[in-house]
Image (spheres, rainbow, N blue to C red):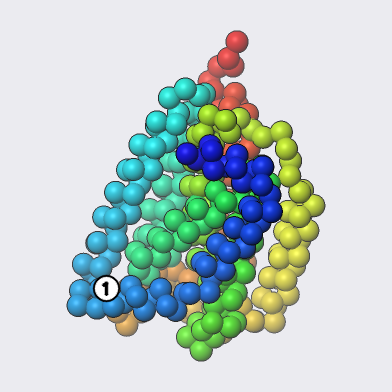
Amino acid sequence: MIKWALNFLRNNRLINIILAVIYFFAVVLPHEQVGLIISKIFKNSTKAYYNQTVLIIAAVGLIIYVLFLILNLKNNDSKRIVFAFLGLSVFLTILMLKTILILNIELIHLVQYGAFALILFPLFEHYFHTLWCCTFLGGIDEAFQYYYLAPDRTNFLDFNDMILNLVGATFGLILIRSVPFFNKSTGNNGPRNFSIITAFLSLLSIGILAMKDLLIKVPSESFWTTLPSKVTYHIVHPLEGILIIVALLLIYAFLNKPNKIFNLTNPS
């Protein structure tokens, strides 16, 4: 099914572009409405029950995801690279749960941007460029919330969510790498100029905004921030966020490498 969908979008680029645009706006615009719906569902529940329920759902989803990967990997040679990056992404997810997430429901970013990576990949046919595009558009998503959607309720541009968006996209790309037809590094380099130009412009813009103190309205006084609800988490600052995002992009760039570099011995 995944292989058929990827090939269909690959051969129908206009449909692919339209679908990507519609999906992006469907993720970005209804933040407030989705938040209200979730609040109504759990209005009579304690925060502990709410977080535990979301965590159980996420764990079940991960189990189903891993089983799907195993089925895909039966007849191809991408096992090492797929499970290496799966382990890294799961580890990062657990780390983010412990450090930069306020509520477990924020794990929905993983699903949103994992699906977005599946939609964007046929346009680029390149793992790194797809990941970069998801990260860049995820930054636009957070900027929309910070500057337009809820400027009175947001004290900082949410690099926490940007990192979460990036890791979410990797789950989609790992799934693609497990599909037999796409299990090798792609020969099509995609629009390299798009990646280079957007990388330069976005990092330049972030640097300028950071110097003008436009990315943080109320800076945190310590590494950990504790909310009145007794939730403690870390606010990722702009420079720190940029370094983390760049480091993750460089690491996940190896998704586009041949399988043989992840094998202990080269296949004959």
Q: Amino acid at mark 1?
A: Ile
Q: Is residue 165 left or right of residue 200?
A: left
Q: Residues within 10 Å of mark 1 (few under 14, many from 20)?
A: few
Q: Is residue 168 left or right of residue 34?
A: right
Return the x and y of residue 117 as percentages of the image width and height: 56, 51
Q: Residue at x 59, y 58 (%)?
A: 19
Return the x and y of residue 66 as percentages of the image width and height: 38, 39
Q: Residue at x 54, y 82 (%)?
A: 149
Where is mark 1, residue-wise? Answer: 41
Q: Is residue 263 above or below residue 54?
A: above
* Res 234 seen here: yes
Question: Residue 242 sits in which quadrant?
Answer: bottom right
Q: Is residue 81 above or below residue 25?
A: above
Q: Is residue 30 above or below residue 72?
A: below
Q: Residue at x 43, y 24 (%)?
A: 74
* Res 237 seen here: no
Q: Residue furthest bottom?
A: 152
Dot 1: what SS?
helix
Q: Nearer the viewer, residue 209 or 142?
A: 142
Return the x and y of residue 257 as percentages of the image width and height: 63, 33
Q: Residue furthest top?
A: 268
Quadrant containing the C terminus is top right
Q: Residue at x 47, y 74 (%)?
A: 31
Q: Nearer the viewer, residue 45 or 5?
A: 5
Q: Nearer the viewer, residue 68 or 1?
A: 1
